[in-house]
Amino acid sequence: MSDAARILHDPPWPSVPRQREAATFGMWVFLASEALFFGALIAGYAVYRVLYPHDFAIASQQTNILYGSINTGLLITSSFTMTVAVQASEARMRRLLIFALVLTAAIGIAFIAVKMLEYKDDLDKHLLPGAHFALPSAATRLFFGLYWVMTGVHAIHLAVGCLLTLALAWAIASRHEVSDSSKVSPIALYWHFVDTIWIILYALIYLPGRP
Amino acid sequence: MSDAALVYVRHRDAEQNYLQAGHTLLSWLTSTDHKRIGILYALAITFFFFIGGMAIGLVRIELMSPHGEFLTDDAYNRLFTLHGIVMVWFFLVPSIPTTLGNFLLPMMIGAKDVAFPRLNLASWYIYIVGAAFALTSIFAGGVDTGWTFYTPFSTMFSNGDVIAAAAGVFIVGFSSIATGVNFITTVHMLRAPGMTWFRLPLFVWAMYATSIVMVLATPVLAMSLLLVIAERWLGMPIFNPANGGDPILFQHLFWFYSHPAVYIMVLPAMGVVSEVFACFARRRVFGYAMMVYAMMAIAVIGFFVWGHHMFVAGQSQYANLVFSFLSFIVAVPSAIKVFNWTATLYRGQITFEAPMLYALGFLGLFTIGGLTGLFLASVPIDVDVHDTYFVIAHFHYIMVGGSVSAFFAGLHFWWPKITGRLYSEAWARFAAIVMFLGFNTTFMPQFIMGYGGMPRRYHVYPPEFQVWHVMSSVGALVLFVAYTLPLVYLTWSLFYGRKAGDNPWQATGLEWQTSSPPPKHNFHDIPEVTAAPYHYHPWQQAPQARQHHRQEMQGETE
């Protein structure tokens, strides 16, 4: 069965290419919004790090850079597999597309699994701000307050990305969507954005205070 | 043909209008038609308008006596907080964009719908979920932080239901973002053939500018409230001074959204009155291009003035200087717009239908609000009147005198298009005048007592302010009547109003070229646009009075 059988486009659109263009454009606009969402968090981090550079260096040394680095490698790899998916979509290589999407989501889930291991490690080391917090100086609590919020918000974004990617893969596999679906490009953009955020967070969380 | 602006052939076949395309409740709740979603939003925000209004009604009753006779301190704090949260996020921010904007934006650019119709419906449900959280907070006892959620009070000391309220505002923010993304994409991607950027009606430009602010400012509010929730609920010490946290950081993040939010509220109003003035003065909008640049300038510069809310919060004097300067700069494009509206009226063939009365009310009240904003933008005066009723009066002149007046102007202007019915013109004019008088009676005394030193958010106050408070409360009662009137005569018109016809005001613009109420997909054929908007008269010629049988237009015998 050929994808060409399903070239219907949705009501407001005069043509499929226009709808595809708009979906990608809409995602760019949404990512601008997301950039400000994380931007506010990173601005807060920047203010506190300028105020308390020493405490941030001490706190950062307590983070688990091994897990963090593995996760960075995973996400960069997932961006590669997502790019393969976009190329496969443009070439209408349906099976490669489904494979690449599922692989991307699997790597994303692996990231979240590693993150959970890291969270457990953090809890064991009493790095959750509260009565039993491990570090003596006060501003280290600010670092870890931001650490939990930043990584938590990022993990939620990644989980949403995994769900979107799997839903898309399922829709294409069950032929509810064509291979060159207008949804591939926006979801890929979102995925790359979440990866990019992680690369910034990696530098902010794990690298201060380390030679 | 001398001034054929829109070459558009209308097919008047028996196509159903959008109201007839399903009569069940489910057909409304699952509709992706932008027109129906606009009406869903209108119902929701009207509900919240009256909730917020009732809260401030109780506050105004309390303030008639200087001793705090009726309410406890805590109840008073919760009422003005409720008023602020509900009016800002559940009425004013969504008011014009999600109702008139949703209904009209696609029609004005000749599109069948917004770019993402399902996202549009989803945004309404997101709004409802956010509203449910806000209502939960209200019924669980309310919040006493003021609408600004200032830390460390909100995170460490308040005994109100801060988390539910903040979560409600956080959630409703995503409804704003969805609307903004949708509108921006719609304007970029779905303009009809020939509808170039500089042929867009100013209302569309206003929606576009508003959407940019919604998309870029709202996420910062979302993050600042998320941090408040993280601190209060999960114990993350983000703004806690005991750990070296900085409460002023919260204020920066909060106002980075909440000052641009003022432009989210007033830019749509500017778009509405531009349409109304042109129509009822039978004039092309004076300086169309400058109007566009001014709106975009307001949207952009509006992002760089937030620090003027922190002149007395311990911000550095150098920051105060810069923010003060930028706040003066943002007044320039607003002033350009006021002058251009005035010039649009100049030598126009003006008639005073209800939408025009509301719009003229906007013009005067917005100007007063804007000029008093300049007082507050200058640091020495702000140090004196900060946190007084002067500030309250200033922003109510912008948000209520400006935005709400314009909302009513737009509602009356497009009501015949939306419903296909005409309301009672006499009652509508009466309500417009009562609203203007009631508004000034309410808020002009607040300028005076604010300048005299009456602080905001207190219900026990020195007796010398009582006379102003009583005047203000009487004005609020008049305003209540004025806001209830449209509810009555507009509802009445739904059942008994005369059929409006397609274009009762003889207005230009694509939305008036289709039938009233419009068909499901707005136009039978996508129109083709060949000229700039507001072709009320040929270039270089004086405008003509509307050739119209007045009785037909007025709907009611007087």
Image (cartoon, coloured by chain):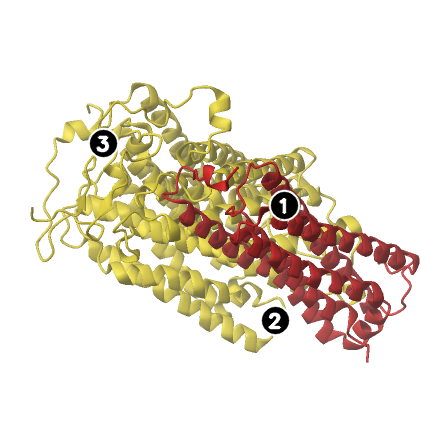
Chain colours: A red, B yellow
Residue B414 is marked as none
The image position of residue A7, as x and y in percent, is 44, 40
Q: Report the side of B238 relative to B211 (left or right).
A: right
**Looking at numbered disc 2 in the image, what kind of residue is underneath it?**
Gln
Same subunit: marks 2 and 3: yes
Q: Mark 2 falls on what kind of element?
A: loop
Give the mark, 2 or 3, whose residue is nearer the N terminus: 2
- Image location (x, y in percent) of residue B11: 21, 31
Label number found at residue B502: 3
- Compared to B556, does B306 lie above or below? below
Query: Which chain does tag 2 point to?
Result: B
Say which chain tag 3 marks: B
Q: Choose mark 1 or mark 3, whichever is in front.
A: 1
Q: In the image, residue A61 lies at what x, y percent? A: 85, 71
Percent of width and height locating residue B372:
41, 60
- Residue occupying the point 37% across, 29% down: B485
Which residue is label 2 attached to? B315
Q: Residue at x 28, y 31 (%)?
A: B416
- Say whether residue B420 is left or right of residue B251: left
- Helix, strand or loop status at disc 3: loop
The residue tagged 1 is: A164
The nearer-to-camera label among 1 and 2 is 1
Q: Chain of mark 1?
A: A
Name above or below for residue A70 compared with residue B9. Answer: below
Image quarter where the C terminus of chain A lies is: bottom right
Q: Is residue A175 left or right of residue B109?
A: right
Q: Are marks 1 and 2 on the same chain?
A: no
Front residue of A51 and B38? B38
Kindly identify the residue that appears in the image at 46 percent across and 47 percent down: B182
